[in-house]
Image (tube, rainbow, N blue to C red):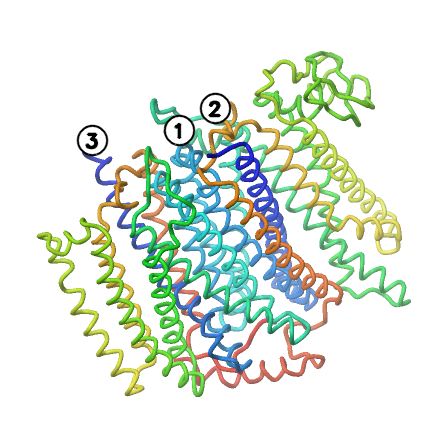
Amino acid sequence: MTGLDALFLARLQFAFTVGFHIVFPAFSIGLAAYLAVLEGLWLKTGRQVYLDLFRYWLRAFSIVFGMGVVSGLVMSYEFGTNWAQFSQKAGPILGPLLGYEVMTAFFLEAGFLGIMLFGMNKVGKKLHFFATCVVSLGTLISMSWILSSNSWMQTPQGYAIEPGTGRFIPQDWWAIVFNPSFPFRLVHMALAAFLSVAFVVGGVGAWHLIRARRAGRQPTEAVKIMFSMAMWMAAIVGPLQILAGDAHGLNTLKYQPAKIAAMEGDWESEGYAPELLFGIPDMENEVTRYKIAIPYAGSLILTHSLSGKVPGLKDYPKDQRAPSYVVFFSFRIMIALGVLMALAGLYSLWLRWRGALWNSKLLQRAVLIMTPAGFIALLCGWVTTEVGRQPFTVYGLLRTVDSASPVPSASIWGTLVIFVIVYAIVFASGISILLRGFAQEPHSNETGPDPRHPQRAAAMAGAVSDNAGTEA
Amino acid sequence: MIELSGAAYWLPVVWAVLAAVAIFIYIVLDGFDLGLGILFFAEKNKIHRNIMIQTIAPVWDGNETWMIFGGAALYGVFPNAYATILPALYLPIFIMLFALIIRGVAFEFRSRMHTEQAQALWDIGFCVGSFIATFMQGVVLGTLVSGIKVENNQFVGSSFDWLSPFPLFCGLAVVCGYTLLGAAWLVWRTESTLQDSMRKWSGILSVLMLLMIVGVSVWTPALHATYMQHWTDWPRILFVAPVPVAVAVLAIVMMMALRGKTSRRIPFFCALGWFFLSFTGLGINMWPYIVPPGMTIWDASSPPTSQAFLLVGAAVLIPLILTYTAFAYHVFRGPVNEHSESYH
């Protein structure tokens, strides 16, 4: 009943929906933290410009967060619809982790989001700031749980397998939650979220700097602050991310060497291994064609020594190899973008030191082009780690083919097509709203009655005079 | 059945009750905001529509989170039920999710569109999405109550088992119920002409809902011999018998409140009362099966270590969640009108 076709479609559907989803929580994680910093700065300094920036980015946040919620709702049911056997076997471990994510993070975010978006005049500045911080904290807690779950699927421990049913029975929750790849993946993902948002904020800032220059006027203070803060973030997090990625890679080498072999397109396990800049892995003939290689660099990067032995795909039986032709490229795109982002960050430091941060056309153009770079890198990273886990769902223990649901391929096809259509509409509308918002500069006095928006001014005045009467 | 004792017996019982409470909280919270969406077909006035949205905008994310919690809890606590219900209801679940996505983004998108046409389109999306999501929740419930074909813990029925009269009738029943909750919520939270119109709708929908309750109650025992037995079974009848009486009492209270315009809140709580009674009746009827006709809560359970681990957290966190959720509602209390502020 469940042929290969249905399995492939189920994977495609899951990959599409989770890939779509992941962008928004990552965006929320970075943006919520940025909003908390902006509001904190406003409270500390009392400068209106920070409040303007806060409200400017808050409007984007409400869109991004909403898209994260609705696409995330899908995920909490898709484990069952697409991966029934996996849910039965791994549910006893992963279900409670997801339950904790909902109870400690989702409710927290949703509970305080309303106050963050609508409550400034109802609860006062301090409590409002608290709400913003709680929402930001919620995004971080959520990330921790889901990465713990995901990491357990990569490096499972703390379980016993029940004879007969094949279920994973939890033995040691501490070991399950803090499985070996979790800390590395958590740090890598957190930095990725911050870096992605740094380039979105920086890209919007760069756009307005360029426009101001073309119009022959000075950029506004809000735009300068936005760009400067983003560049600080890029300068600090960009290089840090390379270190974190390296550490994560070493962790993967230790626990999932077959994944590393697939990522590197290496077939023979050897010392003094080269690093391939390009190649086309051929799984059938067990060779990587059209190689462009840097001698010794593979060993140096993976083992931090020239003679270090790196794994090769031939070390593993054919039915345990991840499709190298996917992860080889996704890994390289991620690395390339990561290096470019770090370089942009470092270059901004140099310009700042020279006092020329606002004048560099090169930096502004580069950052503008790189606005989506963080998200693309992040998606490539996820493709690498998830496809690299194949052909298993729980690494080394439960095969993807034994994880599927008894659902006919026609149902999966149909829903996949609708997913593509619905997400295309939602994504296009969301992005167009965001871009239209970003096309405006942050107004000064964003909260107060704004002469450019008379209705809002009237509504605000009405609300104030009405308040006394409506508090029942 | 294997004899179960100690934690292996009690933990599933505790979780079944807790899951029922969570589902009921979901109905209480998301029911009215889905119903409010459906009421967009009756309220064409743009100002009224904005007011309606404004009454739920600060809280709908939290309402929908209970649905995510339901999925997560089922996954962790009753994985065998999760892994059979979802493949069995693959299509209705996905249709519901698509509808929830469209209506969820419509909250923000509808007010941010530049052209009138685009705004109108997202209003339609909000209304139709709310309707379909609600209808499909009823279908899911109806299919579950009718029974799901399971062998060796795997679903073995067909993709369209849900496309039969009882589930579809349940779909309509839930649509009536949620729309009533939405109308009664708006009686509570709005003023003047909008409130009057919603009072009228509450009356019409109350009658429809009562008919639906009777319909489902008569139909359900006819589905399975075991359900029929529950109505004659001692002592289960002790729990079931007062239900019809209480439904009737609530109907009288509801009618008086709507006629006399004495209270803003009573209609909403009467509607909730009907949901509570129907839901309890259903629970008593299904007990102890989570996937009728064959899978009990014990068959569906994850090991006690999993259930205990999540229970510890739930015992501490759920009361906390309810507290700050109540706080959020408290902050945005009071009637909403066209002068109420929006952050846009």
Q: Chain of mark 3?
A: B
Instruction: Check disc 3 and report the residue beneath it.
Output: B2
User: In this picture, is A295 found above or below A78?
Assistant: above
Compared across the picture, whether B289 is left or right of B117 comes to left
Subunit bearing disc 1? A
Q: Amino acid at mark 2?
A: Leu
Mark 3: give few (<14), some (14-19) or many (20+) Cα within 10 Å: few
Answer left or right for B215 relative to B26.
left
Q: Which residue is mark 2?
A: A397
Q: Is residue B264 above or below residue B56?
A: below
Label whose residue precedes the other's in the sequence (1 or 2): 1
Side of A450 where A10 appears, left or right: left
Q: Nearer the viewer, residue B305 or A218?
A: B305
> How far, Cα to Cα, is label 2 from label 3?
29 Å
Mark 1 touches mark 2? (CB < 8 Å): yes
Which corner quadrant holds the C terminus of chain A? bottom left
Q: CA distance from mark 1 to mark 3?
A: 21 Å
B18 or A219, which lies in front?
A: B18
Residue type pointed to by label 1: Phe
* Quarter of the figure with residue B47: bottom right
- The amino acid on which the numbered mark 3 sits, given as a three-letter code, is Ile
Q: Position of residue A450 (x, y in %)?
A: 68, 79
State the mark number for residue A168: 1
x 37%, y 60%: residue: B168
Mark 1 neighbour class, 10 Å CA radius: few under 14, some 14 to 19, many 20 or more: many
Determine whether B289 is above or below A307 in the image: below
Disc 1 secondary structure class? strand
Helix, strand or loop at mark 3: loop
